[in-house]
Amino acid sequence: MAKIIAGVATSHIPNIGVALDTGKAGDPQWKPVFEGYDYSKKWIADKKPDVVILVYNDHASAFSLELIPTFAIGCANEFQPAQTVWGPRPVPVVKGHPELAWHIAQSTILDEFDMTVVNRMDVDHGLTVPLSLMFGQPDDWPCKVIPLAVNVVQFPPPTGNRCYSLGKAIRKAVETFDEDLKVMIWGTGGMSHQLQGARAGLINAEFDKQFLDKLSADPEALARLSHVDYVREAGSEGIELIMWLIMRGALDTEAHEIYRFHYGVPVSNTALGHMILENPRS
Amino acid sequence: MAKIIAGVATSHIPNIGVALDTGKAGDPQWKPVFEGYDYSKKWIADKKPDVVILVYNDHASAFSLELIPTFAIGCANEFQPAQTVWGPRPVPVVKGHPELAWHIAQSTILDEFDMTVVNRMDVDHGLTVPLSLMFGQPDDWPCKVIPLAVNVVQFPPPTGNRCYSLGKAIRKAVETFDEDLKVMIWGTGGMSHQLQGARAGLINAEFDKQFLDKLSADPEALARLSHVDYVREAGSEGIELIMWLIMRGALDTEAHEIYRFHYGVPVSNTALGHMILENPRS
Amino acid sequence: MTSYTEAFQDIPGTTVFDIHRSRLGYHLNMFCMSLLKVENRESFKANERAYLESVPMTEEQRQAVMDRDYARMISLGGNIYFLGKLSAADGVAFGDMVASMTEGLKEDYARMMSVGGRSIEGNRSKSER
Amino acid sequence: MTSYTEAFQDIPGTTVFDIHRSRLGYHLNMFCMSLLKVENRESFKANERAYLESVPMTEEQRQAVMDRDYARMISLGGNIYFLGKLSAADGVAFGDMVASMTEGLKEDYARMMSVGGRSIEGNRSKSER
Ligand SMILES: [Fe+3]
Ligand SMILES: [Fe+3]
């Protein structure tokens, strides 16, 4: 049977991708950022997941205002890096796992989640920057990826509680998939940032630290945080943090925090946070 | 405040549209079909709804297999009749009610329904045939329409119970909309039919009658019917009947059945059923 | 434990468009969808084989399309609402395409429908038969 | 009772892209989205006014685009991820576009970010201020 062995939380700041793609990862400004993932790279090379369920949001790349799915699961064989005005990121094509993705779609719909199934979707920095942070610059990504796109651009996004519940439903789906697979789930986006208005540049390190603490030790409390609280404390784009709750919901309540990186200096406009959680006995 | 005054259930058989559009509504084959809606036309001319929330499914018109939303709510100003190989139906453009539609989207998402918001969507016979049956052939449709497209083409569709619950959430949304509006909700599709395989042509009049009875008097029992039961008893395309439960969930449990039309002869390949339910004190 | 998709397999003469069939028939169905555009219909009609070869479907699926064998297309992952665009492109009425998938003659099908359709009795379950 | 969208209005210097703003800014944002295509960027750059007039946005929105007044575009329903396509089309870094919406100078913004960003203290609530 398939099994969720671990969860990863990480910011998906676009400029991290730019720094890597333009050979600036060793620059003094960027070095400490990438070094924060040195442990994680070794850890994941050791864990060798077969599939990563990658929870992220699209930033007006694959979806515009014409159609806004709350939860969209990518069931295709592959996903191309999305076009931007600057061009697509020079990273490998993302290979999907259609059998597991469709199985998750079916299982969660029967569990009364109203998923949108997507068979054609380009993936932007929200999905590819986490892959770069965890895997560096390989010729091919070393595992299959199931994109799970969450609306956090158009308010209202799903509630934190709904995200947490979806995580639980995804876990159930994975555990009923009839093939031995090591599955990870990643929650991406955040941490505190605000990209518009007179309050742009907001960073709330104290909130972020508490968020990391609760993500690890008291996710149920986190699931009750309201949208207004996110926006007030973590900035208008800090709402992305709800996606970490999908990851957390898919893990054991008692999952172990085995690594944390909370970078003190905002990366471009955004606070960077990263955590690895392992299920016991995995 | 806005209020749901009544619900309408009706089949949305495409050939009914063809018969009307090609001037055959008076032919002996079609006359009894349209006569079954004579009462309903008078009733609705009297009730004058401001808005109809029209629950239907797309039949590979606006959505293909590229993207399959479980629930998609149309928030646009207008919706064009969808292109078909034979051309679009010669019916008026469908005018939306963006304020109420967006309000329903927001309210249901906050109530943990994972809606897809659609701002550009063409509407096929699933939506326009019910309008024709209830309103005939006016130059403009006499009310605003909020399309609610439900996936019943790709299995699994939402459960019957989920549809019934969504109806309740829609009712709550309507009742918190800050404008005096008379709102109706229509559930369309069905009744028994199967359009493929050696069993094509299946009609189950007894099941359909019981479905109508329960829709009226015991919707909670109906909401427990499984997908296999629908397919077994009502045919592979009879699954469309789950959409009637969204309508029913949005009404009072004690809503009055004030009209029923269950046509004994299948219309093209499909059993035709129609019911009007009024909320008490509406 | 019977899985969700397996449970439907007890129903005779019925193919449910489930997650497995959707993957199987993806390109066949998307080919049919492409026929909604008049320019695609024209280029398909001008050279069916060439058009079909430009779509990454299986050779079996291509042959079933060439043969207009709708029962076979269903068995190869076709979905009825998508296949309806192919029959419409041929000018064939939807009901006649449906009738072509049943065992009897088209005339028998029409007669059956005019007297109330196919009975559910004996058609509920393979095991019950 | 405070409605869902009203609750955000207590937060200073912040515009939440809610259901009302999405309707207001629909065409402005879809115009920005169109700039993802190189041919659209070229025709926009060749004649900004003509391009903008082909989109059914308000005259105020057109003027804000012409002026590259991002704060104004936000107030007229723009969403930051859509507006980012316009600034990118000008070759402007995303962060500089963001900085242009704040009250201080671009250099002040960079300095603020390099020392930990804008503080939350005093920035939580209009009523608390
Ligand atoms: Fe993001
Ligand atoms: Fe239908």
Image (tube, coloured by chain):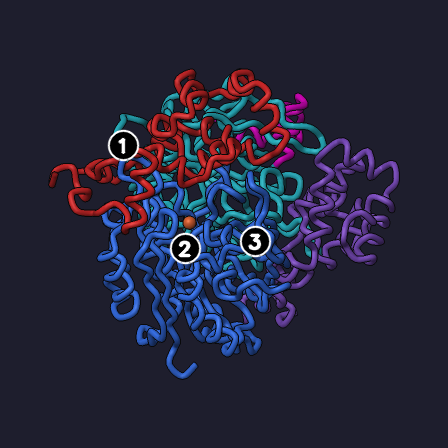
Chain colours: A blue, B cyan, C purple, D red
- Report in which chain the residue with disc 1 lies: D
Q: What residue lies at 35% left-to-right and 66% top-to-bottom?
A: A261
Asked if both marks, 3 and 1, belong to the same chain, the answer given is no
Q: Is ligand 1 closer than 8 angstroms to the Cβ of mark 2? A: no
Please state which of residues B77 and C101 is positioned toward the viewer in this rendering: B77
Q: Give how far across and how far down residue A202 sits, in percent.
A: 27, 45
Q: Is residue D97 visible?
A: yes
Name which residue type carries label 2.
Answer: Gln
Which residue lies under the disc numbered 2? A29
Which residue lies under the disc numbered 1? D103
| Disc 2 secondary structure class | loop
| Disc 1 secondary structure class | loop
> A275 left or right of A16?
left
Binning the other alpha carbons within 10 Å of mark 2 as few (below 14), some (14 to 19) or many (20 upward) gives few
Distance of mark 3 from mark 2, alpha carbons?
A: 65 Å
Please state which of residues B210 and B1 is positioned toward the viewer in this rendering: B1
Q: Quadrant of residue B279?
A: top left
Asked if both marks, 3 and 2, belong to the same chain, the answer given is no
Q: What residue lies at 50% left-to-right and 36% top-to-bottom?
A: D88
Q: Residue furthest left?
A: D128
Name which residue type carries label 3.
Answer: Ala
> B2 left or right of C96?
left
Q: Which mark, residue B234?
A: 3
Name which residue type carries label 1.
Answer: Glu
Q: Residue furthest bottom?
A: A281
- Report in which chain the residue with disc 3 lies: B
Q: Give how far across and how far down residue B223 sits, in percent.
A: 41, 55
Magenta span includes B18: yes
- Report in which chain the residue with disc 2 lies: A
Magenta span includes B146: no
Binning the other alpha carbons within 10 Å of mark 3 as few (below 14), some (14 to 19) or many (20 upward) gives many
Identify the magenta region: B14-39
